Amino acid sequence: MHGGEVRPVEAVEAVDGQPGLLVGPRIARSSLRMLALVAVPAIGLALVVGVLLLADPIRSLTGATPAESLAVERTVLAPGEIELHVRNDGTTALELAQVQVNDAYWRHTVDDRRLGRLDGATLRIDYPWEEGVPLRVAVLTGTGVVVEHDIDNPSETPVLDGDSVRTLGLVGLLMAPVPIALGLAWLPALRRTRAVWFEAAMAFTVGLLAFLAVDSAAEGVESAGEARGLLDGVGLFAVGALVALALVAVVPNDGSADRDGGPWPTSPLRLAALVALGIGLHNLGEGLAVGVAVTTGEVALGTALVVGFAVHNMTEGLAIAGPLGGSPERRRPPGVPVLAGLVAVAGLPVLAGLWLGGFVLPAGWAALAFGVAAGAIAEVVWAVLRWLRGRGAALTPLNVGAFAAAVVLMYATGVAAG
């Protein structure tokens, strides 16, 4: 020092064999440069969007005003009253002017007639509707735009109270957890089969899951068409499917191996849990769809419908039992708590779907649930096929026949479910 200036010691780093380069200032400059590289394109895009919104060049070409758009998000039917939850999902403000029911103007009340962009309102119409008689409700805006909403088979909407929650809960238990548990009861019989029959049972499982994946995709697309308001049904379905596919794909293997030293793609219990998860997500979508149908009065949950779902879901219990039916080591079967957990994962989501669809969510959210189910089940099918390949399973006529039998059975029980 010797009376000279005391300077702080800065960290140094050797680069290309040359020591003494200051690390702190160099890192700061690099961070600022990276921030600028990220921010400049984003700022440029914001400017472009601002110019398009403020200048509105398309409107200056045509001189036309944006079209009004009104979505009916939810319908509630009570004796002598129709209640519509609507939302302005267009780009311009609108006014709720008149309401028609079956081509006749009817007295109504609304909590807010003037709706800005994304604003919602509740319309209450005094109308002596009759159960089972179709209704066509039309909402007229101040500029004469007509928004129609059809109720094909009206019935009273359940209210959120203890009785309704218990009734839907009982229906849900009979639709999924109970029949899935009965299907899982075939596990002792599967564990006593020879290897060739066990592989056939697994091929049967693949057939069940493949049908569920296709069925989830079909129901998801149908639900996407029913999405209203701010919901983009197709987008919800795609987001659910792709995110579920990615999440289920990253479930790690457990590193177990068969008796010949070859790797197992996953343990039998882990595979059964994946199957239960995929089935549970499918049942969540089913519950949402049925709950929304009950709310709108478009489906009557009769005994035949519940019986059909029960038979359909019993085969899903067999799909969960398949991976546990046998293994090269003949592991001990899982205990009752583990099996009960698998039944809960596969069956209880239907209760959440029924309650959410019946009392909370609009129809479009079923598209998201079915998308999640389709993506998850597709990945589970791939996991089961990898597992079979790891065991050296062959594409025998018996296995092909078991796969086809599963598809036919799922189709038949689906038809019975209505």
Image (spheres, helix red, strand yellow):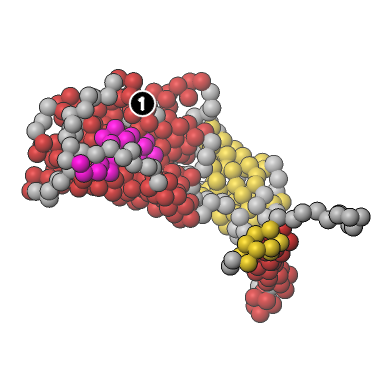
How many numbered markers are drawn?
Answer: 1
Question: Residue at position x 42%, y 50% from top?
Answer: 246
Does residue 207 appear in the picture of this structure? no
| Residue located at (34% from left, 41% from top) | 253
Quarter assignment of residue 267:
top left
User: Which x, y percent locates residue 221?
Assistant: 39, 53
Side of 346 where 140 appears, left or right: right
Q: Is residue 12 above or below residue 357?
A: below
* Quadrant including the C terminus: top left
Q: Amino acid at mark 1?
A: Gly
Q: Is residue 184 magenta?
A: no
Which type of secondary structure does the marked residue at label 1 adopt? helix
Question: Residue 405 at what x, y percent from top left?
Answer: 15, 43
Magenta region: 261-281
Secondary structure mainly formed by the magenta segment:
helix
Residue 416 vs 104, above or below: the answer is above
Rendered view: 18 above or below 124: below
For residue 235, side relative to residue 190 (left or right)? right
Of residues 332 and 402, the one drawn nearer to the viewer in this rendering: 332
Q: Which residue is mark 1?
A: 341
Point 33% across, 24% down: residue: 338
Q: Position of residue 165 (x, y in %)?
A: 48, 24
Residue sitting farthest toward the right: 3
The answer to whether one can see residue 391 in this image is yes
Q: Is residue 265 magenta?
A: yes
Taking the spot 90% from the left edge, 57% from the top edge, the residue there is 4
Residue 307 at x, y percent in the picture:
27, 30
User: Where, quadrant-wise, is the N terminus in this rendering?
Assistant: bottom right
Quadrant assignment, res 29: bottom right
